[in-house]
Amino acid sequence: ELFLKVILRNHEYLSGYYQLFSVTVIAVLFIPPLLFKVFIVIGYAIFIWIWLINLWNRILLSHPFGKQYEGNKGFELAQRKVCFYLTIIPTSILATVVMLAMTMF
């Protein structure tokens, strides 16, 4: 909950998330071969996953409430769940854009 609040309220994190997504969508639309598009989507998913984990650590481990739960299994499970959901949603949108781009061109 704290992680999502910070991301939504801090313009820097939300704009970074949006910039990563928008640049990747533009790259997927303009790069011709399908194989390269698939590599871009996979690379995006890996990159955004790592970026979110680092962001989680920067936000929650610098906060006193988050620091006391460091190493807790529930804390690590929450990190994996949040990073998974915040990665899978834009990655599925990117996959949809790839499919639509293939049918349009």
Image (cartoon, grey):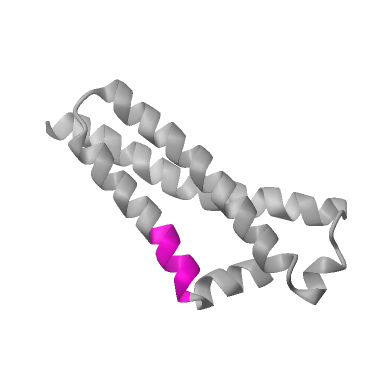
The residue that appears at 58% across and 46% down in the rendered structure is 50
- Residue 1 visible to an observer of this rendering: no
| x then y, percent, for residue 89 | 47, 49
- Report the residue at 37% width, 52% height from top: 21
Query: Is residue 50 shown above or below 66?
Result: above
Q: Picture quarter containing residue 40?
A: top left
The structure residue drawn at horizontal position 69% and vertical position 59%, both measured from the top left corner, is 57
Q: Residue at x 75, y 73 (%)?
A: 63
From the image, which quarter does the N terminus lie in? bottom right
Q: Position of residue 64 (x, y in %)?
A: 80, 75
Q: Which residue is farthest bottom?
A: 9
Residue interval drawn in magenta: 11-18
**Residue 26 falls left or right of residue 52:** left
Dominant secondary structure, magenta: helix
Relative image position of residue 95 (x, y in whole percent): 36, 37
89 part of magenta stretch: no
Of 8 and 46, nearer the camera is: 46
Q: Is residue 80 above or below residue 46?
A: below
In the figure, is residue 76 to the left or right of 45?
A: right
Say which quarter of the image contains residue 56.
Answer: bottom right
Residue 17 image offset from top left, x and y in percent: 44, 59
Q: Residue furthest left?
A: 105
